[in-house]
């Protein structure tokens, strides 16, 4: 347990002596809260795409021309590092600006763009390992931050709900859906769709698993455009920040002193 709550709004809940309801009751309340399902969908989209790409990283790299195991391992490590860096940089920006919706939409759009080269082969050009690795890193930078951004957004719109319940629902939902998507992606991995067969310069094919990931991101993007819920925790923090006459010192999880 941290020595003090992570936000002003959580401190305020401690000051008022509020108790969190039972977990199942919290979950039921979450799904009845306006705006909760949209960041949940974005979180599930992100974790599903990153988990599927990570699971089939060997196949993704080999069909793009990266066949040695060291190269595949380095590409996989680069993908995970890009997810981490994207979460820190883009997530940090959103944490300061609270621009959840435009940044998430931009990340989803970039995810759609970067996922295509992972399964696209231009028959005239052939394999392009450099392009493949660049797209993989771009995908990590774009798709990875969607998770922490929408974890915070879900907590924000459902305040003063149980933050642990919010994050648990997202993690369980994300891992469950991605686990169910893996066999579908494995089947789609062996599906190949050719385009512009009669036009030699444009003749190319794309793998079914990439089309699946593209569709997941596209559907989530369209759904996310409908988000218009108020940011309840941000509003509570702003109201607390406006009252500079009150300083709250949290001594421990069970002891709160209010000095005026």
Image (cartoon, helix red, strand yellow):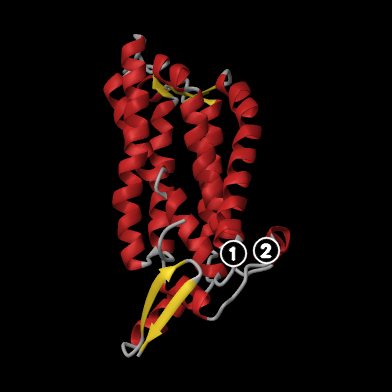
Residue 172 position within the rendered picture, expressed as x and y whole percent measured from the top left: 62, 45
Give residue 75's quadrant in the image: top left
Q: Can you give x and y, in whole percent of width and height, for residue 202 in the image?
A: 38, 25
**Relative to 20, 96 lies left or right:** left
Figure check: 74 above or below 158: above
| Front residue (pair 219, 17) | 17
Left or right side of 133 for 226: right
Quick one: SS at disc 2? helix
Task: Classify residue 84 by image quadrant.
Answer: top left
Residue 231 visible to the viewer: no
Residue 133 in the image, given as x and y percentages of width and height: 31, 26
Circle 1/circle 2 CB separation < 8 Å:
yes
The residue shown at (37%, 33%) is 80
Which residue is more in the foreground, 97 or 59? 97
Whole-percent x, y for residue 79 in the image: 36, 31
Q: Earlier in the sequence, mark 1 or mark 2?
A: 2
Residue 181 as seen in the image, left or right of residue 249? right
> Which residue is painted at 42% across and 33% down in the image?
116
Q: Where does label 2 land, which residue? A: 26
Q: Quadrant of residue 204?
A: top left
The answer to whether residue 157 of the structure is visible from this angle is yes
Q: Nearer the viewer, residue 230 or 14?
A: 14
**Residue pictured at 39% horizontal, 80% vertical:** 238
Q: CA distance from mark 1 to mark 2?
A: 7 Å
Q: Residue at x 64, y 39 (%)?
A: 176
Disc number for residue 162: 1
User: Mark 2 packing: few (<14 Cα in 10 Å), some, or many (20+)?
Assistant: some
Label 1: few (<14), some (14–19) or many (≥20) C-alpha neighbours in 10 Å: some
């Amino acid at each position: 347990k941290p020595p003090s709550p992570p936000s002003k709004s959580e401190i305020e809940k401690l000051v008022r002596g509020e108790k969190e309801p039972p977990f199942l009751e919290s979950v039921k309340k979450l799904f009845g809260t306006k705006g909760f399902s949209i960041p949940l969908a974005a979180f599930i989209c992100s974790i599903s795409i990153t988990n599927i790409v990570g699971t089939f990283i060997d196949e993704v790299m080999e069909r793009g021309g990266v066949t040695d195991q060291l190269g595949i391992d380095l590409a996989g490590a680069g993908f995970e590092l890009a997810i981490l860096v994207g979460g820190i940089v883009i997530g940090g920006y959103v944490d300061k600006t609270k621009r959840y919706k435009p940044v998430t939409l931009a990340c989803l759009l970039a995810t759609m763009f970067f996922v295509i080269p992972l399964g696209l082969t231009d028959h005239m050009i052939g394999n392009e390992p450099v392009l493949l690795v660049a797209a993989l890193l771009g995908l990590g930078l774009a798709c990875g931050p969607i998770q922490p951004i929408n974890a915070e957004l879900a907590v924000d719109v459902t305040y003063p709900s149980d933050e642990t319940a919010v994050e648990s629902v997202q993690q369980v939902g994300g891992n469950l859906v991605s686990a169910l998507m893996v066999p579908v992606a494995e089947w789609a991995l062996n599906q190949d769709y050719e385009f512009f067969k009669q036009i030699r310069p444009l003749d190319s094919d794309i793998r079914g698993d990439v089309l699946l990931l593209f569709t997941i991101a596209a559907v989530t993007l369209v759904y996310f455009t409908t988000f218009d819920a108020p940011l309840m925790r941000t509003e509570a923090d702003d109201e607390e920040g406006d009252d500079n006459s009150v300083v709250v010192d949290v001594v421990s999880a069970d002891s709160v002193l209010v000095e005026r």
